[in-house]
Amino acid sequence: MGSFIKSKIVLEIEQIDRHINESKHIIAYCINNEPNYIEKSGLAMILHSFYHGVELVLLMIIKDKDTYKLEEHRWHKFIYNKAFEDTETRTQILRDELKEILKNLMNFRHLARNSYAYNYDWNKMKNLVLQLESTWDIVKQDLNNFLEVHYE
């Protein structure tokens, strides 16, 4: 079972890598330019997809390593919180320095799923967009370290 889960996690990491690589052009554009409505809509989907991918990896790990029952209406926050905790069966998945940015991405994902694009405020999105590559670098490093320890 462990090698099957590990291969699914590795595949998801590769897909997030591709997602980040495909997004680099628009992210670089945003360093010096405020995106228009269409660009903000695309960036919202990029942020949403990124967080969805990270959350999917965390969900796979937690379902494999822990024995918790997920509550349907609060599972996003549950997964987020558990990623930063040691349990009886595993070490902490992600380092504490990722808490704030991932919480902001989780909250933005909720906004993107439940709001119209004209509600996207560039001032609130900007840091999430511009930090996306560096955030992924740290998350990916933590995930790979976790795989190395727990899925030999």
Image: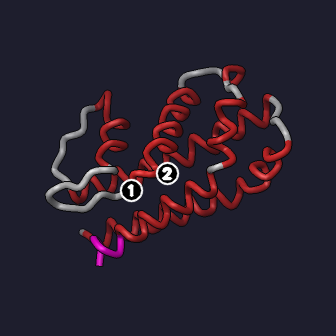
Residue flagged by tag 1: what amino acid is it?
A: Leu
Q: Residue furthest bottom?
A: 152
Residue flagged by tag 2: what amino acid is it?
A: Gly
Dominant SS in magenta:
helix
Specify the segment rendered in magenta: 147-152
User: What label does residue 53 carry, if any?
Assistant: 2
User: Residue at the spot x=73%, y=56% of the render?
Assistant: 24
* Residue 103 image point, x, y percent: 46, 38
- In the rendered image, the quadrant that contains the C terminus is bottom left
Residue situated in front as seen by the camera: 143 or 5: 143
Q: Residue furthest front?
A: 97
* Residue 62 image point, x, y percent: 28, 53
* Residue 114 image point, x, y percent: 54, 23
- In the rendered image, the quadrant that contains the N terminus is bottom left
Give the labeled residue for mark 1: 94
Which one is in front in this view, the residue at disc 2 or the one at disc 1?
Answer: 1
User: What label does residue 78 carry, if any?
Assistant: none
Residue 49: name its quadrant: top right
Q: Label 2: few (<14), some or many (≥20) within 10 Å?
A: some
Distance Cα–Cα, label 2 vs label 1: 14 Å
Q: Earlier in the sequence, mark 2 or mark 1?
A: 2
Q: Label 1: few (<14), some or many (≥20) within 10 Å?
A: many
Residue 32: name its quadrant: top right
Q: Are marks 2 and 1 in contact (CB under 8 Å)?
A: no
